[in-house]
Image (cartoon, rainbow, N blue to C red):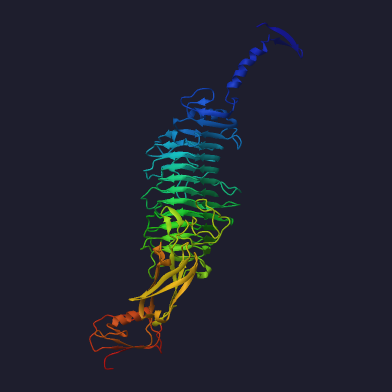
């Protein structure tokens, strides 16, 4: 290099002979182009194909994700995934440039999920995921299968940290479907890298929001989905779980803790069979602010051992939570089963649900159970069935101060034995005979068999279970437009039977029923679609039966009354009595539904004023053969005037108990007189 000199501010400075500018810039340009900081960001359509080639193809998910992390995006990117089995584990972190416009989508193509498989075998509960969305946003996973084959732990998809605006659509997500360990979850949304994190009222919470899980098949795990979030927003919902099939979860199909505002609609949750304590859905610590609320509409729950829906959703802001059009199938195992269990819930609209409890539940079980909250819940147009003949649980058990309104519901309980309670309304236990109108509740409610199409189809064959039209709930479980008035329950009527006559109730005699001849009046209803012009109506007490052939014109769902009087009266004696009434031969044809043809009513009548005998060898209507027979009648029905019992001259070897006697007084005395007195 030739040295020269020049003068700068009086100083002698060496002067270098410069190289050409091109020679200096080429290395710098190469560095800039190859540096990750200045590499070309991704946009447009790419492919992931193990046997593919070309500048826009990646032969593995790992290569595609590494490039995505390295370069970021400057436009929407679509990775089209070819058929094949790809090996995980995959972690997608925050992508530079991703936005609501510049989304990142991995898509196997509609209907192709079964042939686009990403698999991983987890060996421990730490980082047990097939794919993790790690604080990443605007990531869409579509039409792919994520399969974790781990036998000690496993996650299908981990939504980690503050992920937001992510979608999982049309995918299969599989984990072990035989384990009972909390180490397995098909989809987990927490702030933990451990698959064992999270459970009822637990889980390490971050702030994910606008997470959509739609139209997927999710199978296996202790939970099918488990998620937490402490994100607070003015938007109504931050989590959307819709149109999914969730199968074979061991403990809970969908489990949520501390999520503020969700939409869980039109999912089919079929739990692992034979698990007594399993739950289809559970939500703990649900608080709201702003306009946040909870929507659970159109879901079907099956094989739930203990609870179908178990919710703690405190709508503190007054926004109404929506529990609409859900079908909880009768596949329970627990004696404490509850179809819907609102545990301190507030401001919930429980509308148009069908709940079937088919097992022998005790008094800790119910179709709908509402714990104390002090906030108004609304219960309208529900169809609740308790179908085990020995069950003593309630169609509704609402504790004090929990329900503000209840009407147009149908409570059907096969066990209609004397003393059985049908509902407990705000802490008061009520029977089939007295639940209507209690404190203004259930003025227009029913208690009858809706005759569902099948155990899997909640449409009633009865065309006359009509509720009140709710304009905001204008379609049913199957998206059928509701009639006005609508059918009670999750689904509109299947059309009804042509010939279906029912006897509804005894209107006479009225209590207390005196001994002697009594009029009997019953109400009959046409529950079929054909107009009824004739029907046989019968009543029976003991061996005495009276029948009236009614004629007229009774259109669908109308009712009329039949009065048995004069020679058709029943002679009701003191003590325990059971009157039976039934209908037969509508239009001289066969009734197509016999489940509502007959009713019976048991009651106790008092001894009328008068003189009776107690004689083991005696006979006649006023003679009794033992003293115990008399005292049992007195204990049951009491007396309606002074009565005297003349005892025959014999030895009565008996133990008797005479309790508090209804009707007894200083005037209405009970006298037992021995022979010869």
Answer with the quarter of the image where residue 623 lies.
bottom left
Taking 172 as reference, is 475 above or below it? below
Q: Position of residue 593 (x, y in %)?
A: 41, 62
Work out whether residue 457 or residue 73 is closer to the camera in this orientation and state it: 457
Taking 363 as reference, is 580 above or below it? below
| Residue located 39% across and 60% down the image | 387
In the image: residue 50, left or right of residue 646: right
Total numbered labels placed on residues in the image = 0
Work out whether residue 176 or residue 459 is closer to the camera in this orientation and state it: 459
In the image: residue 534, left or right of residue 674: right
State which quarter of the image contains the C terminus.
Answer: bottom left
Q: Position of residue 180 (x, y in %)?
A: 37, 45
Answer with the quarter of the image where residue 356 lies.
bottom left
State which quarter of the image contains the N terminus.
Answer: top right
Q: Where is residue 626 in the image (x, y as percent from the top left)?
A: 27, 82
Answer with the quarter of the image where residue 453 lies.
bottom left
Residue 536 in view of the camera: yes
Residue 514 in view of the camera: no
Work out whether residue 340 or residue 130 is closer to the camera in this orientation and state it: 340
| Residue located 39% across and 55% down the image | 332
Q: Position of residue 155 (x, y in %)?
A: 44, 39
């Amino acid at each position: 290099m030739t040295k020269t000199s020049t003068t700068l501010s009086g100083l002698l400075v060496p002067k270098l002979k410069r190289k050409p500018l091109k020679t200096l810039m080429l290395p710098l340009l190469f560095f800039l182009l190859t540096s990750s900081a200045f590499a070309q960001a991704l946009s447009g359509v790419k492919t992931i194909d193990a046997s593919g080639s070309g500048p826009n193809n990646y032969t593995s998910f790992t290569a595609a994700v590494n490039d995505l992390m390295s370069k970021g995006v400057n436009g929407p990117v679509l990775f089209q995934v070819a058929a094949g089995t790809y090996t995980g584990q995959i972690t997608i972190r925050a992508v530079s440039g991703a936005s609501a416009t510049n989304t990142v989508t991995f898509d196997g193509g509609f209907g192709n999920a079964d042939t686009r498989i990403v698999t991983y075998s987890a060996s421990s509960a730490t980082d047990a995921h097939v794919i993790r969305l790690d604080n990443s946003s605007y990531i869409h996973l579509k039409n792919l299968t994520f399969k974790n084959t781990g036998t000690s732990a496993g996650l299908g998809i981990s939504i980690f940290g503050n992920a937001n605006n992510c979608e999982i659509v049309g995918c299969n997500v599989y984990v072990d479907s035989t384990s009972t360990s909390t180490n397995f979850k098909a989809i987990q949304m927490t702030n933990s890298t451990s698959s064992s994190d999270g459970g009822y009222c637990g889980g390490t919470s971050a702030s994910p929001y606008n997470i959509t899980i739609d139209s997927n098949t999710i199978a296996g795990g202790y939970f099918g989905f488990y998620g937490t979030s402490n994100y607070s927003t003015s938007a109504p919902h931050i989590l959307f779980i819709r149109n999914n099939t969730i199968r074979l979860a061991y403990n809970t199909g969908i489990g949520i803790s501390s999520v503020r505002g969700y939409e869980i609609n039109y999912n089919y949750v079929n739990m692992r069979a034979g698990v007594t304590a399993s739950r289809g859905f559970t939500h703990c610590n649900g608080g709201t602010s702003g306009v946040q609320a909870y929507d659970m509409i159109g879901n079907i729950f099956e094989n739930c051992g203990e609870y179908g829906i178990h919710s703690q959703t405190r709508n503190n802001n007054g926004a109404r939570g929506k529990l609409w059009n859900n079908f909880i199938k009768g596949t329970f195992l627990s004696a404490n089963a509850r179809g819907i269990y609102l545990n301190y819930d507030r401001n919930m609209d429980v509308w148009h649900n069908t709940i079937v409890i088919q097992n022998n539940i005790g008094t800790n079980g119910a179709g709908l159970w509402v714990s104390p909250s002090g906030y108004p819940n609304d219960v309208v147009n529900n169809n609740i069935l308790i179908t085990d003949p020995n069950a003593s649980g309630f169609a509704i058990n609402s504790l004090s101060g929990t329900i503000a309104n209840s009407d147009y519901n149908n409570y059907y309980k096969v066990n209609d034995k004397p003393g059985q309670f049908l509902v407990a309304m705000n802490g008061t236990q009520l029977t089939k005979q007295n639940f209507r109108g209690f404190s203004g509740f259930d003025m227009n409610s029913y208690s009858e068999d809706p005759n569902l199409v099948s155990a899997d189809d909640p449409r009633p064959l009865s065309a006359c279970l009509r509720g009140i039209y709710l304009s905001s709930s204008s379609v049913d479980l199957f998206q059928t437009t509701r009639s006005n008035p609508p059918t009670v329950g999750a689904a509109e009527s299947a059309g009804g039977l042509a010939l279906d006559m029912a006897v509804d109730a005894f209107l006479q005699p009225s209590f207390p029923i005196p001994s002697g001849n009594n009029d009997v009046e019953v109400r009959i209803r046409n529950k079929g679609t054909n107009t009824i012009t004739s029907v046989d109506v019968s009543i029976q007490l003991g061996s005495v039966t009276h029948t009236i052939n009614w004629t007229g014109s009774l259109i669908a769902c109308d009712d009329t009354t039949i009065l048995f009087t004069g020679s058709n009266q029943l002679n009701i004696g003191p003590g325990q009595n059971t009157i039976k009434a039934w209908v037969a031969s509508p239009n001289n044809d066969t009734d197509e539904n016999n489940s509502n043809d007959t009713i019976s009513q048991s009651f106790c009548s008092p001894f009328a004023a008068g003189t009776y005998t107690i004689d083991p060898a005696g006979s006649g209507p006023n003679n009794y053969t033992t003293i115990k027979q008399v005292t049992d009648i007195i204990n049951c029905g009491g007396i309606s005037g002074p009565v005297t019992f003349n005892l025959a001259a014999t030895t009565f070897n008996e133990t008797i108990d005479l309790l508090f006697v209804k009707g007894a007084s200083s005037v209405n005395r009970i006298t037992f007189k021995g022979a010869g007195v």
